[in-house]
Amino acid sequence: MTKLTPEQAAAKVMVALDKPDRSAALQLAEQLQGTGCWAKVGMELFYAAGQDIVRELKARGFRVFLDLKMHDIPNTVRGGARSIAKLGVDMFNVHAAGGAAMMRAAVQGVQDALDAGETATKPLIIGVTQLTSTNLTTLNEEIGIPGTVEEAVLRYARLTKEAGLDGVVASPLEVGAIKAACGASFLTVTPGIRPKGADVGDQQRITTPSDAVKGGTDYLVIGRPITGAADPAAALQTILKEMSSSYDDR
Ligand SMILES: O=c1ccn([C@@H]2O[C@H](COP(=O)(O)O)[C@@H](O)[C@H]2O)c(=O)[nH]1
């Protein structure tokens, strides 16, 4: 059982900069700068602002998780991973549903960039299991995958590990089962974080920041509870305080 210092808590938080353009994202980043949290760049911001936003966030001292969730044939993912690696991000992801060959291709793409001297940074590569916006009905009746959500998540997590990736995106509710199946050092990156009383929005499999810490997650991905607050910096500090007063119960 360990208790987090505020610095350790901040290093576990990835703020989702889901903003429509560079200036809105940098305005938000300015309020978070120096806290030690990560910046997560997803589709909305990357498609609007391009590669430069990653460079600008890196220049401001943020570790960057590029959350583009690649899902394509292995050859395309290999090339995509090489391009992402050149950017110098700290973490990126692919959909585990793309299969083991596709995930291995992502690993190879990073290796291509390293071998060619295009980057000195080896990013962590993470497999997305089952989106936190989905529930049992989506899984069974829409996507057509039988069994429980946890079973599906664990199948994806094991496959991700076998393919040589560093960890998975999953709900904080599934962290204990993932660690038991894949080992303590296999990383868990968990969206679906909602402080008590916060608007749940489109998320389905959620916990509070303190329950996520208690469950042993490595990284808490948090968007709207911070970015939608009147004072995002204060919202982050409240979450960090909650995290550092909780114990990791593993
Ligand atoms: O399963 C997943 C995978 C990624 N996300 C991303 O995390 C953030 C969550 O934002 P909130 O505003 O806190 O809901 C967002 O950028 C998603 O694209 C996820 O939610 N679930």
Image (cartoon, grey):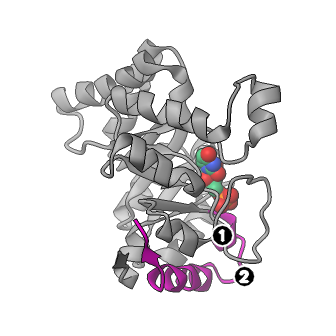
Q: Residue at x 42, y 13 (%)?
A: 75
Tell which of 102 and 156 is nearer to you. 156
Q: Residues within 10 Å of mark 2 (few under 14, many from 20)?
A: few
Can you tell which mark lies on residue 227? 1
Q: Are marks 2 and 1 in contact (CB under 8 Å)?
A: no
Quarter of the rendering containing residue 33:
bottom left
How many discs appear? 2
Measured as percent of width and height from the top left, residue 202 is found at: 78, 53
Task: Name the residue beneath numbered marker 2.
Answer: 230
x%, y% of residue 169? 51, 45
- Element type at mark 1: helix
Ligand 1 under 8 Å from disc 1 Cβ? yes
Q: Going 62% across and 78% down the picture, which residue do you hit?
A: 232
Q: Position of residue 166 (x, y in %)?
A: 34, 41
Give the residues drawn in magenta, as a range.
223-250
Q: Quadrant of residue 58?
A: bottom left
Which residue type does callout 1 highlight? Thr
The front one of 227 and 245 is 245
The residue drawn where x is 66% and y is 83% is 231
Q: Label 2, label 1: how many angstroms apart (C-alpha)?
A: 8 Å
Is residue 190 in view from this perspective? yes
| Residue 94 visible, this angle | no
